[in-house]
Image (cartoon, coloured by chain):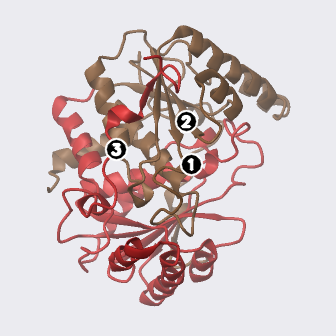
Chain colours: A red, B brown
Amino acid sequence: MIFSEAERAAVYKAIHTRRDVRGEFRPEPIPEEILSRILTAAHHAPSVGFMQPWDFIVVRDPKVKQEIKEGFQVAHNEAAEQFEGEKRATYQSLKLEGITEAPLGICITCDPSRHGPVVIGRTANPEMDLYSSVCAVQNLWLAARAENLGVGWVSIIHHQALRAALGIPQEIVPIAYLCVGYVTQFHEKPELESIGWLPRVPLDALVHHDRWESPL
Amino acid sequence: MIFSEAERAAVYKAIHTRRDVRGEFRPEPIPEEILSRILTAAHHAPSVGFMQPWDFIVVRDPKVKQEIKEGFQVAHNEAAEQFEGEKRATYQSLKLEGITEAPLGICITCDPSRHGPVVIGRTANPEMDLYSSVCAVQNLWLAARAENLGVGWVSIIHHQALRAALGIPQEIVPIAYLCVGYVTQFHEKPELESIGWLPRVPLDALVHHDRWESPL
């Protein structure tokens, strides 16, 4: 199946207008059919040895969201301590999650022992199962963008807090807790870029030829 | 920027027709402009604290590809030993990489110390830098599909072999070595599904509600 120019442009539009959404969630529910499409997109991520190590916990219960929010708050307070001076004040002023405002939470996990101990392609690099679940996150994120849905990845929370709030067994690895919902807007640029926290690195500075130290 | 129905369908087309390509690479070179677009797509992946931890080593030199191939062969032989009986024979019969046939290799890495020791969003989960580079892999993969380019992820190779072949410094983490090129065809389904190695898990079996053990 060949891609037309218009189809290619649509894929790049999703890639380039995708944002990490924290402060712009609207409360409208997400139709089941659309939720099903973005989960199906996640489930069609590449996975090492076709192991499909992911599970999806869809969170709607406000009490569960509140527990997740408390877990965030603990890790967020710890994090603030690690920044010095002005950076700390900036850090504390940022809106970094939309856990209780987003109509849905989706936790994506990884089951390292799915389909038995030996997995094609995972023998030299056991972390490939985790990476497969990360690919599912990115598929879901881009599918959501194409559905005009915002997604925010809450990484400021300890695994134990996610396990406790969501009843995740000890042998399952939490990969991402995502806030998902319609939004008032998508920012034109990543917020940390807009506020000058860090600049976008020029692509040329990141591309090497044949070896890390490319001959000049 | 709202997505139209046609644009949404194009994004799903990329997600659902993306394949891990091993045996179908054609030798035609990839135009620079297209290479630049897929690298730009990778560079616009989400990254924790906007740290953009990735680098891209673009491999065209046949000698370098040959070294990578030898690294694969070592890890592949080790892997075969881990499968029993019939599974071993099947494993050994599979074409698992297209390192020397693909016109391009692209190694995506992660620099954990980019932009200093404290990164927003990485304080509770230090692996978020690795996960950001994985998101870059998936962006590149989908962009490549929209460019009618195939991609294969070579995970059967030790980090040390990649470091040696590509001169990657010890403090940089190799994430993925990708084979990239035009293809004779994209398979309709993942090859491991088609040959019956593993079935596609029904999505319903992977979705939980509010907690891992959803009430019946």
Which residue shows up at 46% across the image and 37% down it? B55
| Quadrant in the rendering for residue B103 | top left
Task: Say whether marks 1 and 2 touch (CB < 8 Å).
Answer: yes
Q: Which mark is residue B60?
A: none
Q: Which mark is residue A201?
A: 3
Q: Earlier in the sequence, mark 1 or mark 3?
A: 1
Give B137 or B79, whichever is nearer the viewer: B137
* Image quadrant where residue B63 sits: top right
Residue A131: mark in rendering: 1
Kind of residue at badge 2: Ala
Q: Which residue is mark 2?
A: B176
Find residue A192 and report its horizontal and vertical position in percent.
Answer: 31, 62
Taking B66 as reference, is A20 above or below it?
Answer: below
Residue at x 72% of width, y 65% of height = A171
Mark 1 and mark 3: Cα distance apart in space: 24 Å
- Marks 1 and 2: same chain? no
Q: Say which quadrant the C terminus of chain A sits in.
A: top left
Q: Quadrant of the N terminus of chain A?
A: top left
